[in-house]
Image (spheres, grey):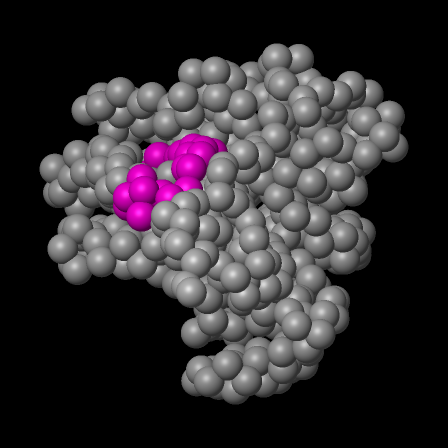
Amino acid sequence: MLAATLGYDEAAGISPDSYRPPPGLARPSAAKAAALSWITANETALAGLSDQIWRYAELSLREWNSSRAVAELLRSNGFTINWGAAGLPAAFVASYGNEGPVLGFNAEYDALPGLSQKPGASVHDPLVYNYDAYGPQYGPGHGDGHNLLGVGGAGAAVAVARALQATGLKATVKLFGSTGEEQLVGKAYAVKAGVYDGLDAFLDWHPFNATLSFWNTTSALMSATFTFLGASGHGGTPLGNKSGLDGALLTATMSEYLREKNVAPSGRFHYAIINGGAAPNVTPDMCSIWFFIREGSPERAQVLYDKIVECAKAAAQASQTRLVHKFHAGTWNLLASKAGSELLNDNMLQIGAPRFTDADQALARAIQKSLGKPQTGMPTELVPLTPPAASYTGGLSTDSADVSWQAPTAVLLAAAFPPGLPNHNWGLTATAATNIGHQAMLSAARYLAAAAVDLIEQPALLDGMRQEFADRKSVLTWKSLIPDGQQPPIYQPPPDFLAATGQSFPPAGLQWPVPAIVATEQLGTTGPTLPPVT
């Protein structure tokens, strides 16, 4: 993995001290002008669609309305839509043309739990607040900006298709509607099923707090749940009860002891307890803890994953519960294209950074103040393109990483929320439905579309990406982390979604209903019966 990513750059003599991005890659043309003109003419419609998906705020693998909205933009602009990619109902592939190089774009549209926020609000003020006297919760929200991501990718794909119409250039444009990215599910299963086969290049972006292209890597990730099954009983007479929550808490506690001696600087793991009981006077007989495990390569992630599995086994033994262990998804590290990044960067320099108004800057500074960060406002310049750092110390993951091992992948980030803020925060939910988010989305669409036109009009650029891709991949063989025969996590779509998309449920080859996980454990012993005291 190191040889394919950072080691490749080192062997090629690429140094942060001496590197200079090559100029002259992006060239003006009638086709590029047509693509950019379409985006400009449709700014209001694209922003409106993004805001519509923001309001849906649908969770992973259940983006019924959001996926249809993105697909309709593409269908109405001449794309053919094929639903149910890899057996995932909310996934689709939209295609335009059938000649020339095959270029792929990405659309995601899932929200995150607990990140509801009113649009443009500079203090934490959830749009959806679910009252409960004992445990209130916030509703879901687009705290990773996937409403922007999906429309930006789709807008770029349509813009390129319009450029083909206007100029007669030959290419095949594909937009992959990807469900469940926040759970690292959609592309991992779709890649294994061959959905992304045949691409000549893949162009992607993500909302961020700065605007730049890059060819750094990301962390490999494994996702799994550990469900502990026991025997319920009254909390006031707990002798003999077997608590699933005990098993989950013991797993969490034991895993924390791994951090000092078993987790490298490139490693991460984090967890959430899913169903820890509803009342203190009922011992829960079922509880699940969900882990994400990240590392600098799939092999290193597997080592850390196996240690957490052993913690769960020991926790089940100690809590006298039964363990049901479920692997859900896994994805590789990103293999980004240096040549693709350089092409994006050159187009970004020509097009310019996102433009923010005085009101945008005031909102950004107010959000930064609320979250205790320097009040710098939104960035007004591009971040210069630089090589990745010489060592990898871990970080984010993406299921686009699996796509990056199937085709040369060019990636950029666009400023959709203020500097100093992380992704997965209410501050991003707040800006994702404002002009700040709109400008990031529109800029990203322009950057992606312009670079795609260059790849079509300048075959040598595409050849360079292909050669770099082959060279990087030559040092190892990619293999999906999804086991053969593994069924993806799925939810049953509503009837109107199935009717509108022409699908039936369950998809072929998938089992529904999924077998129930039920606690059938006996109550524990309380010791021998004692003779009466007389």
Q: Which residue is at 32% across, 42% downward?
A: 317
Q: Is residue 172 magenta?
A: no
Please state the extent of the stretch shown in magenta in the rendering.
311-333
26, above or below 409, in the image: below
Tell me the quadrant of the picture where the C terminus can be found: bottom left
Q: Residue at x 66, y 72 (%)?
A: 134
The residue lying toward the viewer, choosing from 524 and 160, is 524
Q: Is residue 324 magenta?
A: yes
Q: Is residue 142 left or right of residue 66?
A: left
x, y percentage for residue 332? 35, 35
Q: Residue at x 59, y 21 (%)?
A: 86
The image quarter in which residue 367 lies: bottom right
Position of 286 relative to 359 (above/below): above
Q: Is residue 224 above or below residue 79?
A: below
Q: Position of residue 266 (x, y in %)?
A: 23, 52
Image-based side of 515 in relation to 501, left or right: left
- Closest to the observer: 110 or 9? 110
Q: Is residue 429 left or right of residue 403?
A: right
Look at the image and tell me whether residue 69 can be seen.
yes
Whether residue 312 is visible, yes or no, is no
Residue 509 horizontal/vertical position (percent)? 61, 13
Is 257 left or right of 322, judged from the image as shown?
Answer: left
Give the quarter of the figure containing the N terminus: top left
Counting labels gives 0
As drawn, the residue found furthest toward the front would be 534
